[in-house]
């Protein structure tokens, strides 16, 4: 019996829609039956759960996440396991986390290329705090990368003044490990994340908290310059983007050094180096990003979901939606979609999780690290479908 939307997991979590899937797990948006709270449930794939080593490793994520409770780390709410009867009975573990509404940093960089310096610095300091907590718990995260950083819906527009305002959070502890016995994390477990992995991780040597500092350095380098550093000679971020203050540039340049000893030796040391810049100017309204030809005016809301794109020729391709509006969606795709290409998209609607299939046109496209980011104009969606999208956008704008 597969696990799919509509099922109630462990009698408590009603699965509403699939957010994403990897070779190891399935991630669902779900509703806690008793409280009505929306949560994110990660379920190990039964085929993986059969292997006792992988079962134990998945379960260990729950303890690691619980040990790292911090404002900038995704919050674990529950964990458990269910018995699934396939050709034999398999005990399948799952994790329940807070459902985060915003965009991944991957989505932000895909759409905009870079981030304003103040926002990148703010993000860097928040993530240093998250890493400091993780390292104090004798763990390394092992996979700090833009798709493991979630930003709140409105980070670009306002400062998070309120105590409970949504903030940037680090997710995915599936690569995390204890540092006591010397950690080795297999490189390339996620091929597309290789540029964020430290040289020691790629060489299958032991990694340490300083390896996480390297990965965060690469992320910040990309936030400020548009790309991770290339090759052995590192161009300082300031040379590529004059708006980056020299001390910030120097801190990031140090963090991405190949030699472990040349980097800041802890997340705290990296935070201190990043903070050496002159005080930031008073908050100002950031310039609105230039609208590209054909972009829709309707408000966009973050919405990560798998999308199948069917083209006139060839097999359907898998893509990942990053945000949606009435009339359009932004997706990251490995396929080279052409400008103005007509396609058909299949995806699950926000809120209801109902599957829809609709024609769409590629209105703009931009090369990205792992393929292209495209803006799709959705055509002929039913009024009901548009209403579900509109409600999702409004719910997010309300900050819930
Ligand atoms: N708590 C959450 N709330 C909302 N969206 C989430 C949450 N956790 C993850 N996501 C979304 O799902 C994507 C994949 O999540 P994650 O990296 O945790 O899993 P994975 O890499 O697919 O699985 P695995 O743990 O098997 O490697 C993220 O990039 C993000 O877009
Ligand atoms: Mg992941």
Image (spheres, grey):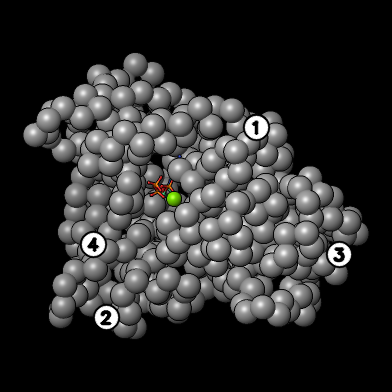
Instruction: Give the residue at the far left of this rendering.
Output: 87
Image spot of residue 282 (x, y percent): 84, 54
Task: Report, in whole angstroms, how far the alpha carbon at label 4 lies from the one at label 1.
Answer: 40 Å
Q: Earlier in the sequence, mark 2 or mark 4?
A: 4
Residue at 45% in and 43% down: 174
Residue named by callout 1: 137
Residue at horizontal 31 percent and vertical 83 percent from the top: 338
- The residues bearing labels 2 and 4 have C-alpha atoms spaced at a distance of 15 Å
Q: Secondary structure at mark 4?
A: strand
Image spot of residue 114 (x, y percent): 62, 68
Residue 35 appears in the picture as rendered? yes
- Judged by depth in the image, the label closer to the viewer, 3 or 4, is 3
Residue 30 % position (x, y): 33, 33
The earlier-in-sequence mark between 3 and 2 is 3
Q: Earlier in the sequence, mark 1 or mark 3?
A: 1
Left or right relative to 61: residue 7: left
Q: Position of residue 3 (x, y in %)?
A: 20, 36
Query: Seen in the image, is 337 located left or right of residue 141?
Result: left
**Residue under the image location 78 percent in, 59 percent down:** 261
Q: Which residue is mark 2?
A: 341
Dot 3 or dot 4, earlier in sequence: 3
Which residue, given by chain and number where applicable, does mark 3 sit on? 247
Look at discs 1 and 3 and give the one toward the viewer.
Answer: 1
């Amino acid at each position: 019996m597969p696990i799919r939307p509509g099922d109630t997991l462990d009698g408590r979590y009603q699965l509403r829609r699939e957010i994403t899937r990897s070779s190891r797990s399935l991630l669902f948006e779900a509703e806690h039956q008793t409280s009505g709270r929306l949560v994110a449930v990660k379920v190990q794939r039964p085929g993986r759960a059969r292997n006792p080593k992988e079962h134990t490793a998945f379960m260990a994520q729950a303890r690691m996440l619980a040990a790292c409770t911090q404002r900038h780390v995704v919050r674990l709410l529950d964990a458990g396991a269910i018995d699934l009867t396939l050709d034999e009975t398999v005990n399948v573990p799952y994790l329940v986390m807070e459902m985060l509404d915003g965009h991944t940093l991957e989505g932000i960089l895909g759409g905009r290329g870079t981030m304003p310096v103040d926002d990148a610095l703010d993000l860097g300091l928040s993530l240093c705090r998250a890493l400091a907590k993780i390292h104090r718990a004798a763990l390394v995260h092992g996979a700090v990368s833009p798709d493991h950083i979630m930003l709140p819906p409105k980070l670009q527009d306002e400062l998070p003044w309120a105590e409970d305002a949504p903030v940037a959070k680090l997710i995915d502890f599936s690569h995390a490990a204890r540092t006591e016995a010397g950690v080795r994390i297999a490189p390339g477990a996620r091929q597309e994340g290789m540029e964020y992995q430290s040289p020691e991780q790629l060489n299958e040597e032991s990694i340490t908290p300083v390896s996480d500092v390297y990965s965060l350095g690469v992320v910040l380098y990309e936030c400020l310059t548009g790309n991770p550093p290339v090759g052995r000679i590192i161009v300082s971020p300031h040379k590529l983007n004059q708006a980056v203050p020299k001390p910030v540039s120097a801190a990031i340049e140090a963090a991405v050094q190949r030699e472990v000893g040349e980097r800041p030796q802890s997340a705290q040391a990296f935070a201190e180096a990043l903070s050496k810049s002159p005080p930031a100017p008073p908050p100002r309204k950031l310039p609105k990003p230039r609208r590209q030809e054909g972009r829709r005016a309707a408000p966009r809301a973050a919405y990560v979901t798998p999308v199948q794109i069917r083209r006139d020729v060839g097999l359907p391709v898998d893509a990942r939606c990053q945000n949606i509006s009435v009339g359009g969606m932004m997706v990251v795709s490995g396929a080279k979609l052409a400008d103005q290409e007509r396609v058909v998209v299949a995806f699950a609607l926000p809120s209801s999780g109902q599957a829809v299939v609709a024609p769409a046109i590629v209105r703009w496209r931009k090369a990205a690290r792992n393929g292209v980011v495209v803006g799709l104009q959705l055509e002929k969606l039913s009024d009901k479908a548009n209403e579900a999208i509109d409600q999702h956008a409004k719910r997010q704008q309300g900050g819930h």
